[in-house]
Amino acid sequence: MLSKILIANRGEIALRIIRACREMGIETVAVYSEADEQSLHVQLADAAICIGPGPAAESYRKADRIIAAAEIADVDGIHPGYGFLSEDPDFAQQCEDCKIKFIGPRSTAIRMMGDKAVARETVRAAGVPTVPGSPGVMESAEEALPIAEQIGFPVIIKAVAGGGGRGMRLAHNSMSFQKEFIAASMEAAKAFGNGAVYVEKYIEEPRHIEIQVLADEHGNVIYLGERDCSVQRRHQKVIEESPSPFMTDALRKAMGEAAVKAAKACDYWNAGTVEFLVDKHRNFYFIEMNTRIQVEHPVTEMVTGVDLIKQQLLVASGQPLTIRQEDVTLTGHAVEVRVCAENPARNFTPSPGEITLYYAPGGPGVRVDSHVYGGYHIPPHYDSMIAKIITHGKDRDEALDKMYRCLTEYLIRGIHTNIPFTRAVVQDPVFRQGHATTKFVEDFLLRTPKETFIESEQ
Ligand code: ADP
């Protein structure tokens, strides 16, 4: 069993991992940037090592500093959390080379799934449905245009290295195709240092439904139901839930089995997520695999009763899975809202600064995963997500009623947050009836008076 690990992350996920380790008797070493000295993960870990200045490129993304910290602290493993180095195959390989257990899949699986064009081909060959698209990377708009015409407009041009909703452009016709192709490629080169793009059919108003998988190092792979993440702003998830209101037992089984096939196709181990788009006829198409723990993992934990972080640690210790597919049952309904320090009145621009007053919601069926507190200063360098509220109810209505109650109770003063916005979404009839597709937020913003969600949180 792993006895001491380093957590190569910050914020709520670092805390989440510390909590699992505490319960399992695993010692923890935090790393932190100069901007995070006051962070809770630094205070709650058994030891903490400063790895550089505030900007992530000079600290949390510096693989060599993290490896050096791991060697100094003499840990057995590194948990990368999400973001930062979690999907960097070179980092995972460095860990392997240094005989430090990377708490995630092996580097070869990360590399394969990290290139979306390779991932598509790999899972397609294994019998998983993919979105109709170009056979791999397209070198130029001229090469890609006839293929786009063959697929049929609209098409989406996507970066092979894409993530976080960036490097993606929609083209409605041949006229705009070249412009969008170049724009996607340039954006990808800037954001990911890799301008390679491919083309996919644009699925109209799909749902984003993903499957959580768990695999051990002995070839066992299971799926733990789905998460519906259709409520997105600019391709970024805002609210997630499990089960999906659009799901049927037959579809869950088909998607679950497809997700297991995708995992097996890249010799996957540890926790992972296979993402699909589902059209209105309930056809599903693979879009990508996230080779790490995800932000929204708690909704799966709430309905399955499985602690995914503990499972990651057990699997990384070489233990076989003790949960069999037939043991997985979904109980009730869980919803997660991502609370972000951003200002809905100013097009959701980040709102860092000091939290002057803080009171988190609680009560039965409520979980708040957060690293912030009253007096905490949100640094400007990182993602704007400051908390996740997760509610669990006997059914969807109860989970959503609880969520609404939590969103009226949560007190965060001194900065702006998206709480008024998420509160309005949770009460929205279209969302309430379970009809949200990935186009929901765009439509909601157009039809909802701004005053509904821009009231001052100051
Ligand atoms: P990222 O890695 O940047 O998150 P994804 O491939 O996971 O990118 O896609 C993010 C979101 O973009 C999806 O949830 C969906 O809303 C939208 N999207 C991606 N591909 C398509 C497609 N072919 N058709 C329609 N929407 C898409």
Image (tube, helix red, strand yellow):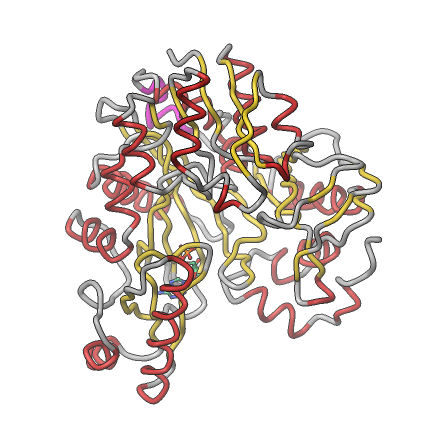
- Name the residue located 58 percent from the left edge and 47 percent from the top edge: 382
Q: How many marks?
A: 0
Residue drawn at x 64%, y 37% is 391
Write down the quadrant of residue 191 in the picture: bottom left
Residue 386 sits inside the magenta stretch:
no
Q: Is residue 112 above or below residue 136?
A: above
Quarter of the displayed picture in which ligand 1 can be seen: bottom left
The residue furthest left is 125
Is any atom of residue 330 visible in this view? Answer: yes
Give the image quarter of residue 190.
bottom left
Q: In this view, does 239 lie to the left or right of 400?
A: left
Q: Position of residue 429 (x, y in %)?
A: 66, 61
Task: Give the residue displayed 41% in from the left and 21% down from the top.
Answer: 313
Q: In the image, is residue 7 above or below residue 359? A: above
Task: List x then y, in percent, for residue 314.
Answer: 38, 18
Residue nearest the observer in this picture, 136 or 250: 136
| Residue 390 x/y as whole percent | 62, 38
Residues rendered magenta in the picture: 321-328
Up/down of 231 relative to 35, above or below: below
Q: Is residue 280 visible?
A: no
Residue sitting at x 48%, y 27%: 7
Residue 286 placement (x, y as % from top left):
31, 54
- Residue nearest the observer in this picture, 264 or 327: 264
Give the quadrant of the N terminus: top left
